[in-house]
Image (cartoon, grey):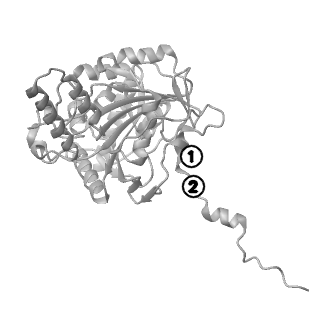
Amino acid sequence: MSPPASSSGLSYARLRNAVRRDSFSDYLPLVAWDDETEAFLCIDDTWGHAWELVPTAYMFGHVQSALQGLLNIHFPDGTVLQLHTFADPLIDDALDAFLDLKTRDDPLIQASARRAHAYLSEGRHGLKALHGIPVRNFRTLLSIKTRRPLGEDLRRQVEEQLSKLGIRRLPPQEMVAFYRRIFNGVADPAPGVFADGSTTGAPPIAKQIIDAGPDLVFEGAEVFLGNQVARCLTPKAPARRITAERANRLMGGMRGASEDSDQIGGPFLYTLNILFDHSQFEIHKRAQILSAQKAAGSFAVEVGKQIEEIGWILDEAGNSKFVRVIPTIWVFGRDRAHARDLAARAKRLWEGEPQPFSMQKRHLWRMPLIFKVVMTVPQCAWTYSWTQIPSVSLGSGGWPVLDAPRSLVAGAMCQRAT
């Protein structure tokens, strides 16, 4: 009998398994853009709409009331609302718009405008007059994801409610460009051209986001995205008390030069995810569990506080609605050391206040992408009354920002950088 044939040769199946890699673009939410509904179709059969709020330098009382009115809109069950604060390092467009406004043919005015343009352009990597704090364009984005396309009536309610904030619909090209910058480098501009996924033969939009190049590498708490290193922080336990003024300071000190060291010195993306799941059943279930507990000693004090809190929630549940909140913050560093420094400073800001948050580093991918929220509610999600959300949503604090092009403002509390 002849010996069996040797199987040491490389088969096509073994070769294919050896070179096959998991494609991260399979997990990006964008599939196609629909012109009729002006919305993105996402991979979980939902529809995403996006707006940008301009200007966004500071949040006063009328802004808080506008956000509270936004949450008072009757969104259908399963709606996810996201508020994003993005410290954008690309400031060229704002600086060029400032120069275009200087039309008076006066040598002194033109020279002054050019010097201001050059000075702030160099400050994108840090201004010496502000202890190395970089100049950034702080942007606020609003995204809403629903199970069905958002009707024109609801969309008009959103835009009317936020008309004080200069709301504008975000074109699909800008959304695609934003995605490309996140995954390929936030410090570099990206094109917004894409092939519509609804066209026959065109790939999904998600397949057109990530450039060919270095692999996405996950090493502990660090994620290597293109030419940058990213780190994620999420609150493990919420602060016992939060106000709009304190929420501003969580992203940077706003008391002038004395808090120049309390700044996140690089690009970051803060996202507040708000889930409208109407969790009345879970509130009552938790109340029953707490009321049945018996404790003694120091543990009884903590249980008593929780019972008192759940009692207040039950009183509010009759005439108020509750939502789930998932806050996340990502920092983007030039290298590992820079990303580590940005994450440490952000953690110190959130944990350094009286009655602070308890922060944790995420070792799993949880990027707060627009239209992308985990389907299972994680442990970092908390239940809030809708009247409390405007205090939790963050605006810019005292960072160097670019305001209206007519008067370039850079510095804490509108102090000009000199």
Q: Secondary structure at mark 1?
A: helix
Give the residue drawn at x 62%, y 65%: 18
Give the residue drawn at x 45%, y 35%: 192
Residue 64 at x, y = what percent?
28, 23
Residue 37 at x, y = what percent?
54, 21
- Residue 354 in view (yes/no): no
Q: Tag on residue 257?
A: none
Number of numbered callouts drawn: 2
Q: Which residue is mark 1?
A: 26
Q: Disc 2 marks which amino acid? A: Asp
Q: Disc 1 marks which amino acid? A: Asp
Q: Which residue is mark 2?
A: 22
Residue 265 at x, y = what percent?
22, 47
**Residue 405 position by quadrant:** top left
Q: Residues within 10 Å of mark 1 (few under 14, many from 20)?
A: few
Up-down: is 354 above or below 77? below
- Residue 302 in view (yes/no): yes
Q: Are marks 2 and 1 in contact (CB under 8 Å)?
A: yes
Q: Residues under labels 2 and 1: Cα distance? A: 8 Å
The image quadrant where one finds the C terminus is top left
Q: Secondary structure at mark 2?
A: loop
Q: Nearer the viewer, residue 355 or 339?
A: 339
In the shown orientation, is residue 199 left or right of residue 269? Answer: right
Residue 85 at x, y = what percent?
32, 35
**Residue 255 position by quadrant:** top left
Up-down: is 126 above or below 286? below
